[in-house]
Image (cartoon, rainbow, N blue to C red):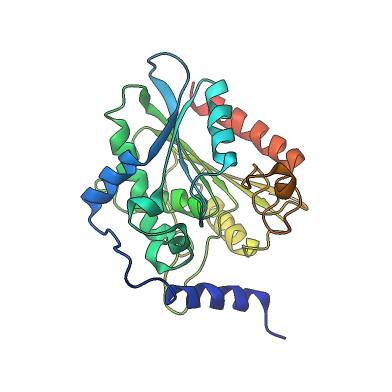
Amino acid sequence: MIRKGFIINLIIFLSIFSQNTFAKEIKDPIQIKANLKENMKIVKPDGNGPFPTVILFTGAGDPFWRPGYGNWMNWLKERGYASVISDSAKSRGVTGQAMMSRKLMPIDRAMEVFWIKDLLKEMKFADMNNIALMGMSHGGDTVIDALVYASEDPNSYNLNGVKTVVAFYPGCRKPIFGVKLTKNFDNPWRQNNISLSIFQGSIDAWNKIELCQDVVERQKGIGTPITYHFYEKARHCFDEVYHNNISIAKEDEKCRYDEKFSNMAKSEIEKQLKEVFK
């Protein structure tokens, strides 16, 4: 019997070669950074700030904007935090499906963490001494990979001011047929001043959860501040509504919102942010 993991990996690998070769992909970092600013959504409390600010990163696929991201941003606003999110795919001249192939893997997308953080310096509402990163799925791997880059070369990849990181159901994916998808699978990060929380469900159909569990144990072994939240019977997308219809979101077999697990995770994150944004 063919293993499910092999089939998933094969699908991802084959999608690498199914992209539209005529798409005008943007590769110039300066242009991508400018586009990220143009395609950015901002939600903040009333007033001028500066406010502790959370940089969010979406999961893969289309459309970029889903109700769940707006719900998260409003949830953060209610607690006194600003948040920003940008369209990674559009900023690079590709579709969200590119995040399912080597056109835009977390190992590459992680550069956006540093570009967006740099853009925030121009925005007076952001407290640059109190920044958090949060990513869902592909975005979860993206923010974790940023930790690795900054650990390896802190002069080139500056995370000064970043106090904590939240990653929902990342894949921690290993290379597929020689294509490296994430940096965090093979490479540890060593910051002791940036905490990380990972949230995963036991019946995640899109991720092999053992991969991230191994990464968590590796990081605990070298003493980095990491917390792992594992929810029995939770699926991918459990934290918010990533469908246009909440009824569909509650019934989707693979990407299912679950209010119980959502509230549990938000309670943990609320404590996490209060602790670091003192």
| x, y percent for residue 76 | 54, 28
> In the orientation shown, which residue stands out farthest toward the bottom?
1
Report the residue at 45% width, 61% height from top. Answer: 99
Above or below, 31 relative to 262 = below
Q: Quadrant of residue 1?
A: bottom right
Report the residue at 42% width, 13% height from top. Answer: 47
Report the residue at 38% width, 38% height from top. Answer: 40
| x, y percent for residue 240 | 64, 42
Above or below, 211 relative to 63 = below
User: How many callouts does the rendering have?
Assistant: 0
Q: Quadrant of residue 119?
A: top left
Q: Say left or right for 46 vs 250.
A: left
Q: Say left or right for 43 vs 271.
A: left
| x, y percent for residue 23 | 33, 66
Q: Nearer the viewer, residue 108 or 162?
A: 108
Q: Nearer the viewer, residue 29 or 169?
A: 29
> In the orientation shown, which residue stands out farthest toward the top?
47
Q: Is residue 78 visible?
A: yes
| x, y percent for residue 221 | 54, 54
Q: Is residue 148 visible?
A: no
Above or below, 79 relative to 141 = above
Report the residue at 27% width, 58% height from top. Answer: 26
